[in-house]
Amino acid sequence: MKEMVLVNGARSSSVEVLDRGLQYGDGVFRTLKVVAGEVRWWEDQYRKLAEDCAALAIPCPDKQALGGEVRKIAAGPGVGVVKIIVTRGAGQRGYAIPAAAAASRIVMGFSGGGNETREVRVRWCDLRLSVQPRLAGIKHLNRLENVLARSEWSDPEIAEGLLLDEAGHVICGTMSNLFLHEQGRLVTPDLCGSGVAGVARGRIIRAAGRHARQVRVEQCSRERLLAADGLFLCNSLIGVWRVAELENRHWPDDGWAEKLRSWLDEDH
Amino acid sequence: MKEMVLVNGARSSSVEVLDRGLQYGDGVFRTLKVVAGEVRWWEDQYRKLAEDCAALAIPCPDKQALGGEVRKIAAGPGVGVVKIIVTRGAGQRGYAIPAAAAASRIVMGFSGGGNETREVRVRWCDLRLSVQPRLAGIKHLNRLENVLARSEWSDPEIAEGLLLDEAGHVICGTMSNLFLHEQGRLVTPDLCGSGVAGVARGRIIRAAGRHARQVRVEQCSRERLLAADGLFLCNSLIGVWRVAELENRHWPDDGWAEKLRSWLDEDH
């Protein structure tokens, strides 16, 4: 499939070399699943995009205009994934934010995104995530830690790598958020120092509340994770994966993966 | 001045949106000073570029080919700065490094870079640098911390902001490395966890050795910095700045700035 891309609303396959997204990773992004030509969870995705832009003081593109571009790309033949990048736009040399910078928006369509996987094997990554409260939770373009972590394995049987921060807290997967089931209760790692607070994670937390089950957002050690009754990974594309195997630890199906999947899909 | 840019050797002002430099900040860069149409310290700059590429497993562009492109851009009218970006090249969606990725090289010419400043006022930044030993020292494209730190002030009288890491160690300026003069001895902060190990810093350390003055590479607290007899900032464009004022602390000229400048310029 030829990629379909809109750059600031116009068909293009390139951005200016002076764009601060390239120069400094000065921007944010979103990955949206497309089902039958329509993006899922647009309201949540746009809200998170706006929050992330605000956190970096990047003007967020107008919702209607961006939504129109996203729908246009999503409707393309074979598109299963739409990725949105918003950068601080083109600047001159230097870290200082130009007064006149106009944000760039890039909307890309990709095939794929279909996912029949439900149970996965995962591994621990050696790389430890750094702690930066000013950037934690934001899906920004500074993703070298994820790239390095994902490069630690090539075995296609391993679906994801789990990451600890430098203090040894479990944070997330290289591309997913994490939930633990502990004796009827759900826990998800605190992301105040590292990691990305994804839309799927947010939807599960909110849905749990609607079902009178509070999700605890807490620090999780490696030992706590290994002692959990169930372990689940989520993001907007994969939905929910049940972790069946982590190195020598095996988990039987505790029934919670299906529950999380149904919560994730709830309209509300 | 119109920017002059070569992308993979050809005149261009844009890169593919799928370039991993944009998607993830998956690349490295260099900033070179141009004097009378020629770049300074090419051997050092290329060596550091090759080291940084190796640290991220990005194939480094061939020295002769890249050198030719750099000379071509440097010879352009009014060019005072050449910036080189090397990325892991275009990929598909996802953090995994594509087997077939060919690095992209971007060589840009900018005006400016002339610098008559010799003494500066600086400030402390509030942002604390995160600690990531896998990325420390590398001049990579994940520079949001620098962007956020530089956005903390707009007073043109303040030339630079000093950064501490999360543990309170002094690391660097937003765009410069730091040296302390302590009773006839030079100290520069240890960069094993954060910061960029710049070419100017490396040249000063090596030159000091030739002059039988070892530079201590050590952890520096804020208190140690304030107690120093002199404080100096360096990079490839500014050369050496003497810090005359840091909030309420004033330093008289101890004569070391001139010494560091002459060392920096030594051929060897």
Image (spheres, coloured by chain):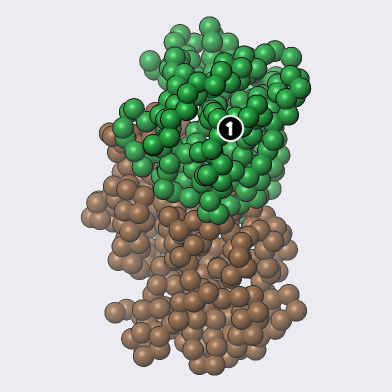
Chain colours: A brown, B green
Relative to A2, residue A47 above or below = below
Q: Could you say where residue A41 lies in the image, as x and y percent from the top left? A: 35, 68
Residue sitting nearer the eye, A30 or B80: B80
Relative to B111, residue A224 above or below = below
| Circle 1 SS class | strand
> Residue A166 is drawn in which quadrant?
bottom right
Residue sitting nearer the eye, A59 or B199: B199
Q: Amino acid at mark 1?
A: Leu
**What residue is shown with label 1?**
B180
Side (left or right) of A39 relative to A169: left
- Which residue is outermost to the bottom? A183
> Residue A51 is drawn in which quadrant?
bottom left
Relative to A135, residue B110 above or below = above
- Subunit under mark 1: B
Residue sitting nearer the eye, A214 or A235: A214
Q: Could you say where residue B16 lies in the image, as x and y percent from the top left? A: 49, 38
Tell me what residue is drawn at x 66 percent, y 45 percent.
B192
Relative to A203, residue A95 above or below = above
Instruction: Say if residue B249 shows up in the picture.
Output: yes
Quadrant including the N terminus of chain B: top left
Quadrant including the C terminus of chain B: top right
- Which residue is outermost to the top? B36
Instruction: Say if residue A11 shows up in the picture.
Output: no
> Residue A243 is drawn in which quadrant?
bottom right
Tell me what residue is drawn at x 43 percent, y 35 percent.
B249
Tell me what residue is drawn at x 59 percent, y 70 percent.
A169
